[in-house]
Image (cartoon, rainbow, N blue to C red):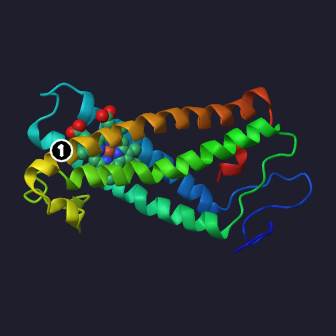
Amino acid sequence: MKTSLSAESGFDSAAGATQKYTRVAVLLHWLIALLILANIALGLSAALLPDGTFSDTGIRFVIDTHKSIGITVLGLAILRVLWRLTHRPPPLPAEFPGWERAAAHAAHIALYVLIFAMPLSGWLHDSAWVAAASHPMYLFGLVPWPRIGFIMNLDPATKEQLHSQFGALHTACSYALYGVLVLHVAGALKHQWIDRHSVLRRMMP
Ligand code: HEM
């Protein structure tokens, strides 16, 4: 584990230079952000648009793509945590007040938790679907992806009940995600435009 800033980990420690995240961290950050936004749009379209908006094949395509993107996010999130465990992110500028550091830190922890909670609660929800056995899941229509076995093997009545409970959990996590995303983006924009001390640059290629 690296414990100091180094050129190898991608941080420029020259006096006055902006300390940046490594290229891998930047790539993972924007890829995960993009896929999460796409999945929010697909999830909301499936959940909120009136019946009949999509044809039967259309709605299946939307939901199946949503599931595939969600599982991809889970894989990328694991890579992101591995990066985080082996690298130290560039420190926040020294002039930031304590409350802003604490808020940024809390938002980052909440984001890590939610980036896992979203796909895991979705996977649980999908595994409890009574029709799961007759609708096998394929990532992007290509790669077979398993459901969670012990949930699939429960009796239909229990699955029905769990399906709505995990669905409610998935929705609750999405509300928490909207809140934390708004705080996270608002913080970055405040530093960019009000404080005139960009932290966004650190996360740019
Ligand atoms: C990045 C990860 C994910 C995000 C951000 C996400 C987001 C969402 C959102 C915003 C909704 C609408 C919730 C509502 O307002 O009620 C939703 C619904 C749903 N999600 Fe996810 N989700 C993710 C991963 C997954 C995964 C991995 C699965 C399954 C393997 C999944 C399965 C579902 C299902 C079945 C629905 C309900 C769609 C419907 O109403 O028919 N999600 N998701």
Residue drawn at x 37%, y 52% as measured from the top left: 119
Quadrant into which the N terminus falls: bottom right
Res 181 quadrant in image: top right
Q: Position of residue 197 (x, y in %)?
A: 80, 37
Left/right placement of residue 173 relative to residue 48 reads: right
Label 1 secondary element: helix
Res 8 quadrant in image: bottom right
Left/right placement of residue 76 relative to residue 166 reads: right
Q: Position of residue 3 (x, y in %)?
A: 77, 70
Quadrant into which the C terminus falls: bottom right
What amino acid is at disc 1? Answer: Gln
Q: Quadrant of ligand 1?
A: top left
Left/right placement of residue 128 relative to residue 205 reads: left
Report the front residue among 59 and 100: 100
Q: Can the viewer see residue 67 in this picture?
A: no
Q: Residue furthest right?
A: 15
Is residue 158 depicted above or below 81 in this figure?
above
Residue drawn at x 47%, y 39% as measured from the top left: 177
Which residue is tagged 1? Answer: 161
Residue drawn at x 28%, y 33% as measured from the top left: 45
Q: Can the viewer see residue 116 in this picture?
A: yes
Report the front residue among 1 and 10: 1
Q: How many marks?
A: 1
Left/right placement of residue 77 relative to residue 17 reads: left
Q: Position of residue 189 (x, y in %)?
A: 67, 32
Report the front residue among 119 and 68: 119
Q: Residue furthest bottom?
A: 1
Is residue 55 depicted above or below 133 in this figure?
above
Residue drawn at x 38%, y 39% as measured from the top left: 40
Q: Position of residue 78 (x, y in %)?
A: 48, 64
